[in-house]
Image (tube, rainbow, N blue to C red):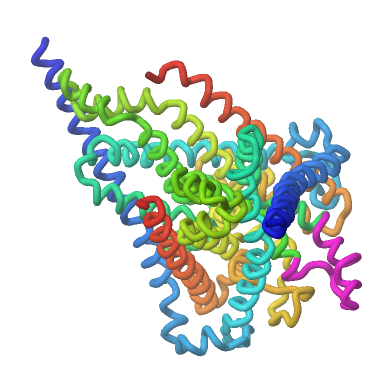
């Protein structure tokens, strides 16, 4: 009996080890599989056109066999830049307030709010954007600059993205400011600096790489966001001249064109190429920001 | 002397303003969703499948999308746990002595965490085209599972990391095997964190639209088999909102309200569950 129990335990241990090894391998291979899969799928277009032409041409007419991604890349840059400019200062200032000045209860409530904001699906933000941001731009903001706008614009996309990236950036910034050692803060305060001077001259410098990482995380989130942006950005394949004009970011291009791409094989490859660009840029961003985060937490 | 305290006061008010503005944005969003959705809400919306002419404003509801989303995300969660739990346990039990490998996996998970769902969707769709598969519930489940595996594994890992190492040594000392250390001791100790992680991943699964846009298809019926296509709530909102007919648009608002309430309930549940199961923790 004891022999049997012993064998059983060893068997369970062996089986669970195999399960664990398989799972770890699967997870390690996932990014490689995605990268390779997308690369293989996009081979036809890379073979047919030189890489430079694909990235710098703004001529997008798949039916005539012209594939230039420049317009979409620029649109992505527009919405991401607007989102960054709007959300980064708000997040940094709020994180400083919550960790250095505010009562612990305020921080607790704010953590709840961050959780809720991070949990709300992007399509809900999109609906909010269509209901509030788009009419606001059309009726209030654009006339202020004497511009005619339908409201569906890169600015609308940027505003929605800014709101969506707040929970991620803010959460990380709070972690960074909370993680800094109390001693350096106390040293600065005992030298006669007030809290704001301590923040400005000590904490921000000490946490600089972490702050950059948090902002980078926000950017990579904005670059890949699809549905919410798709709903408010207008989806016109022309380079936006100002922020009240519609744009057509890369994820929106992917989401809009899957259905009818089956007729032309190069078209499918072109969309896979767009996905590959997106994947590579965001992976690069994430590797960079994570290196910074690991550095910061080691300190 | 005066100047620096004026500067501090200025920034203090600015910081208060930005913090308040975040709270206002969230409450404003919820207010708009509830106000718009409340008018279009009815019992038929959440209890019936779409009837003929639904997309022209005729009767019916979005039961197909609600159930579709539930099936899809629950299936994906189960798959993700099957892969994610052993990896997280391995990182904290089996591989404690291989610190570098643990760091490598953690780094990889953090990097994958930010890959957008549309990329997963494109990848899965590429594979489906390659093997000539049709959009189905199963394909959707697998795609969403790929998407949430890094998230759920990393959250599991964070929960398991808080367990003191002495517990592992104690388990070995009384003659426990590695699998007992992980699946009995560590699993039970981290249970509150694990449940929270599962519920948060469920939120992601229900709310994600871009990854299932091409892999799960769309249908007016509740899926019966894994090979059936399925509707999802976010896509139902997305398609109905782009309709020019006011009644259909109204229904999109109601569907948004349903989705928002589901997400809010799950977030609250995850908080309660996290607290409830704390009593088993040493």
| Dominant secondary structure (helix, strand or loop) of the stretch shown in magenta | helix
Quadrant into which the N terminus of chain B falls:
bottom right
A63 versus A25 height, above or below? below
Percent across and percent down for residue A71 are 63, 81
Asked whether residue B140 is in view, the answer is no
Q: Looking at the image, which is closer to me, A36 or B128?
A: A36
Residue stretch rendered in magenta on the structure: A132-155
Tell me which residue sits at (19%, 41%) in the image: B97
Tell me which residue sits at (74%, 51%) in the image: B13
Tell me which residue sits at (79%, 67%) in the image: A152
- Quarter where residue B64 is shown: top right
Q: Looking at the image, which is closer to me, A116 or B257?
A: A116
Residue B25 lies in the magenta stretch:
no
* Residue, far left: A3
Q: Is A221 left, or right, of A87 in this rendering?
A: left
Residue A145 lies in the magenta stretch:
yes
Q: Is A159 left, or right, of B115 in this rendering?
A: right
Q: Is B153 left, or right, of B64 in this rendering?
A: left
A82 versus B59 height, above or below? below
Percent across and percent down for residue B20 are 74, 46
Tell me which residue sits at (70%, 40%) in the image: B260
């Amino acid at each position: 009996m004891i022999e049997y129990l012993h064998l059983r335990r060893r068997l369970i241990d062996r089986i669970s080890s195999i399960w664990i090894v398989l799972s770890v391998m699967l997870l390690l291979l996932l990014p490689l599989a995605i990268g390779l899969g997308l690369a293989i799928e996009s081979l036809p277009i890379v073979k047919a056109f030189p890489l430079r032409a694909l990235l710098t041409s703004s001529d997008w007419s798949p039916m005539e066999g012209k594939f230039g991604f420049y317009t979409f890349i620029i649109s992505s840059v527009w919405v991401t830049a607007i989102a960054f400019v709007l959300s980064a200062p708000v997040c940094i200032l709020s994180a400083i307030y919550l960790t250095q000045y505010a009562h612990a209860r305020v921080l607790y409530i704010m953590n709840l709010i961050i959780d809720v904001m991070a949990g709300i699906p992007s399509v809900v933000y999109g609906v909010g954007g269509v209901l509030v941001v788009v009419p606001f731009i059309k009726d209030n903001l654009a006339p202020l600059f004497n511009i005619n706008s339908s409201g569906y614009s890169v600015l609308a996309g940027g505003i929605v993205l800014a709101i969506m990236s707040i929970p991620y950036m803010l959460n990380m910034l709070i972690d960074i400011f909370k993680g800094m050692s109390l001693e350096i803060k106390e040293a600065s305060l005992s030298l006669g600096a007030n809290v704001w001077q301590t923040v400005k001259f000590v904490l921000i410098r000490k946490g600089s790489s972490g702050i950059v990482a948090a902002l980078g995380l926000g950017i990579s989130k904005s670059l890949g966001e699809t549905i919410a942006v798709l709903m408010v950005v207008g989806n016109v394949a022309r380079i936006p001249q100002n922020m009240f004009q519609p744009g057509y970011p890369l994820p929106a291009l992917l989401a809009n064109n899957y259905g009818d791409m089956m007729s032309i094989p190069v078209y499918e490859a072109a969309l896979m190429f767009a996905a590959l660009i997106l994947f590579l840029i965001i992976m690069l961003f994430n590797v960079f920001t994570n290196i910074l985060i690991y550095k910061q937490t080691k300190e | 002397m005066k100047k620096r305290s004026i500067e501090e006061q200025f920034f203090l008010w600015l910081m208060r303003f930005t913090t308040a503005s975040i709270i206002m944005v969230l409450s404003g969003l919820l207010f708009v969703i509830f106000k718009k959705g409340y008018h279009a809400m009815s019992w038929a919306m959440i209890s019936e499948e779409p009837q003929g002419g639904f997309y022209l404003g005729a009767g019916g509801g979005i039961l197909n999308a609600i159930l579709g989303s539930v099936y899809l995300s629950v299936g994906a969660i189960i798959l993700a746990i099957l892969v994610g739990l052993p990896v997280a346990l391995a990182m904290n039990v089996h591989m404690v002595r291989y610190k570098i490998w643990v760091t490598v996996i953690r780094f990889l998970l953090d990097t994958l965490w930010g890959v957008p769902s549309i990329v997963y969707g494109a990848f899965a769709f590429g594979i489906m085209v390659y093997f000539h598969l049709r959009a189905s519930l199963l394909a959707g489940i697998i795609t969403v599972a790929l998407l949430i595996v890094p998230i759920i594994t990393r959250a599991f890992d964070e929960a398991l990391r808080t367990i003191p190492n002495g517990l592992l040594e104690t388990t070995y000392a009384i003659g426990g095997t590695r699998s007992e250390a992980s699946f009995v001791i560590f699993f039970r100790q981290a249970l509150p964190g694990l449940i929270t992680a599962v519920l948060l991943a469920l939120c992601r699964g229900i709310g994600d639209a871009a990854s299932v846009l091409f892999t799960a298809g769309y249908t007016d019926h509740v899926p019966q088999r894994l090979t059936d296509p399925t509707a999802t709530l976010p896509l139902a909102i997305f398609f109905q909102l782009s309709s020019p007919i006011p009644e259909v648009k109204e229904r999109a608002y109601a569907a948004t309200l349903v989705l928002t309430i589901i997400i809010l309930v799950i977030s609250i549940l995850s908080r309660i569950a996290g607290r409830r199961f704390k009593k088993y923790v040493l």
